[in-house]
Image (cartoon, rainbow, N blue to C red):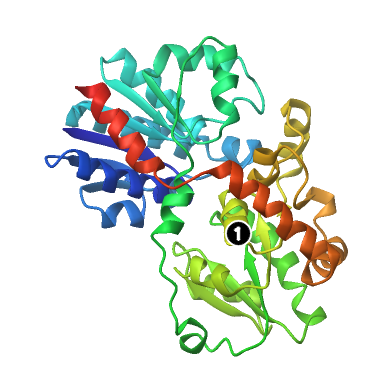
Amino acid sequence: MKYYLVAGEASGDLHGANLMKALKAEDSETVFRYFGGDKMQAEGGELVKHYADMAFMGFTEVVLNLRTIFKNLKACKEDILNWKPDVLILIDFPGFNLKIAAFAKANGIKVCYYISPKVWAWNQKRVLKIKKVVDHMFCILPFEVDFYREWGMEVDYVGNPLLDEIAQFYPDADFRTNNNLGSQKIIALLPGSRKQEIERLLPVMLSMTDNYPDYIFAIAAAPTFSESYYHQFTGTKKVHLLFNNTYNLLNVAHAAIVASGTATLETALFKVPQVVVYKGGAISIAIARMLVKIKFISLVNLIVNKKIVTELIQEDCNPEQVNLELQIILDGEGRTEMLNNYNELLGLMGKPGASAKTAGLIAGYLK
C-alpha cells in the first residue's frame, strides 16, 4: 500500500513515526511519502517537506504567513495527485490538514485522520465538514468519542500514542555524567518547538535561574534550531542546552516549566511536577478568548477535567507568577498533591498500543 502522511508539527512527527512503524508491521509492502520531520524520516520513505517550514502559531502569525501557507498547500495537493496514494493519513494540524482532506476527498482519495482536531474547543460546527471529507477518524482523548457521537459521527478511540513512545524509552544511565549535570536537583525548561513560542516563553523561563542557585537548569532544545539560536536567550546564564534528549531530561528532572502543548502531558506521564505557560500574540489571544469554549489549555487538565497543573497564560506568564508557582511544586504539600493527581491521570490514560491499534484499523478499512 502507498501511504501519504501529513504532519505539520513536532508532536505530529513523533506520532507519525510511531504510526509508520506500526503500519510496516501490518503491511510488509508499505511505501511512505510525507510532510513531516526527522522522526518520520528515520522510519523510511520520502520526506517532501519538513514541519519546521510549516508550523505557525496563533491567528496573527497565520495571517502574516499566508503566502507561505498557500504555497505549502499547493505543493502538497500537487504532490498527492502526482503520487496517487492508496490512502491519505492526516495527523492533527487542522488548519492545513482539513483543507488537504477536502481536496483529497474531491479527488477520490480515501482519507484517514489520526488525532482529532480540537473541534470541541471552538467552532464545533466544523464537525459537519469533517463528516463530509474524512472517511475514518481516530481519536486519542476519551471524551472525543461522545463529542463526535453528539454530532452524528462515529469515530474510533485508539488510546494515546504518547504512551507508545514512552514505553519504548530506555533511560540513559550515564545521562547526567555525559551532559555534566552533576548531582543537584534539575529544573527542566521545555519552551516548545516553534520559533514564536520559544521567543515568547524562554526568556520568562530563564529568569528563574538566578532565583534557584542550588538547582541545575536545562533546556529541552528543539532539533530544528542551532545552539547559537538558543545562546541569544541564554547569554551568560548557567543553563544546559540538551538536543534530542527530552525524555532523558524528564526522567531525572525534579520539576519543570513547560509550554502548553503535548509536552505538558509528557511531563505528567514522567511524574514531574510542572508549571504550564503560554503566550501568544495580543490579537490572537483576544480572538481565542472570544471563541474558545474550554476551561483549560493543558492536556493534563483537559483529560482529567479539573485543575491539576497551574496554567499561566498571557499576562499571568511573568517572572513573578512563574516563580511563585514553581516554589509551590518544588517541595511540600503542593508538590505531593500534584503527584497524587497524576495518578488519576495515568488511570484515565490506559495502556500503550495506540499506534498498533490505529494501524490495524487502517489496514482493515483499506481491505
Q: Is residue 177 above or below residue 231?
A: below
Say whether residue 59 is left or right of residue 168: right
Residue 285 pos. (x, y %): 74, 39
Q: Quadrant of the C terminus?
A: top left
Q: State the image quarter where residue 259 is shown.
A: bottom right
Residue at numbered disc 1:
267
Closer to the camera, 5 or 271?
Answer: 271
Near-viewer residue (227 or 164) = 164
Work out whether 26 lies above or below 260. above
Q: Can residue 275 be seen at all in this image of the molecule?
A: no
Picture coordinates of residue 113 (x, y %)? 40, 29
Amino acid type at image mark 1: Thr
Task: Classify mark 1: residues with Cα within 10 Å, few (<14), some (14-19) or many (20+).
Answer: many
Q: Identify which residue, 291 or 30, lies in the foreground.
A: 30
Residue at 36% x, 52% y is: 37
Q: Is residue 40 left or right of residue 264?
A: left
At a point 30% along the width and 36% down the height, the residue shown is: 359
Is residue 158 visible from the viewing direction of this image?
yes
Q: Residue at x 11, y 40 (%)?
A: 29
Write the residue at 38% across / 22% down: 136
Q: Position of residue 196 (x, y in %)?
A: 61, 53
